[in-house]
Image (spheres, helix red, strand yellow):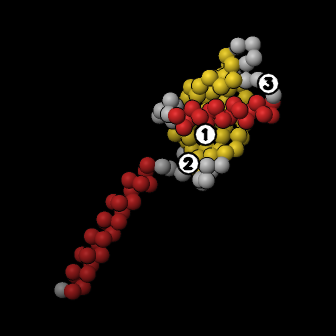
Amino acid sequence: MRALVSTVIAAAAAVALCSSIAPAASAAIVGGWRPIKDVSDPHIQELGSWAVSEHVKEAEDGLSFTKVVSGEQQVVAGMNYKLAIEATDADGKSTTYQAAVYEGLSSQRRLLSFKPSN
C-alpha cells in the first residue's frame, strides 16, 4: 500500500512539474526569430535611434533617426534584433535601413550591421 501511495505522489509531482515548465518554455524559444509585436514600444524606438547614432559615429553621413517601422527579435544570451529603420539624410531624403543589434543581459549593445534596404 505504501508503495502505491508513493508512486501516485511521485506521478502527481511529475505532472505538476511538467505543466509548470511547459508555458515558460513555449513563451521564449531560444534561437527562433519572432516578429516584434509592438514596434512603437519606447524601448524598440530607442534601440533604433541608438543604432542610427552608432552608425553615424562610424559613417559620419549625417543620418537622422525617424522611426522603427518593423522588426524581429531572437532570444539568445540576451536579444538579437533585426530592425527596419526609417532615417533621413542631410538633404531630407528618407530611406529605410536594415539594422542588426545585439543587446546583452547587462544591457550592453552592439551594432552588428547597418545598411540600406533593397
Q: Earlier in the sequence, mark 2 or mark 1?
A: 2
Number of residues whose C-alpha sits closer than 10 Å to that of mark 2, classed few (under 14), some (14–19) or many (20 or more): some
- Which residue: 71% across, 41% down? 112
- Which residue: 55% across, 48% down? 75
Q: What is the CA distance from the residue labelled 2 to the residue labelled 1?
A: 9 Å
Q: Callout 1: helix, strand or loop?
A: strand
In the image, 60 versus 69, the foreground residue is 60
The picture quadrant where one finds residue 84 is top right
Amino acid type indicated by mark 3? Asp
Number of residues whose C-alpha sits closer than 10 Å to that of mark 3, classed few (under 14), some (14–19) or many (20 or more): few
Q: Nearer the viewer, mark 2 or mark 3?
A: 3
Horizontal and vertical percent for residue 40? 50, 29
Amino acid type indicated by mark 2? Val
Q: Pointer 3: what residue?
A: 61
Amino acid type indicated by mark 1? Tyr
Q: Earlier in the sequence, mark 3 or mark 1?
A: 3
Q: Quadrant of the N terminus?
A: bottom left
Q: Callout 2: helix, strand or loop?
A: strand
Q: Pointer 2: what residue?
A: 75
Q: Nearer the viewer, mark 3 or mark 1?
A: 3
Q: Pointer 1: what residue?
A: 81
The picture quadrant where one finds residue 115 is top right
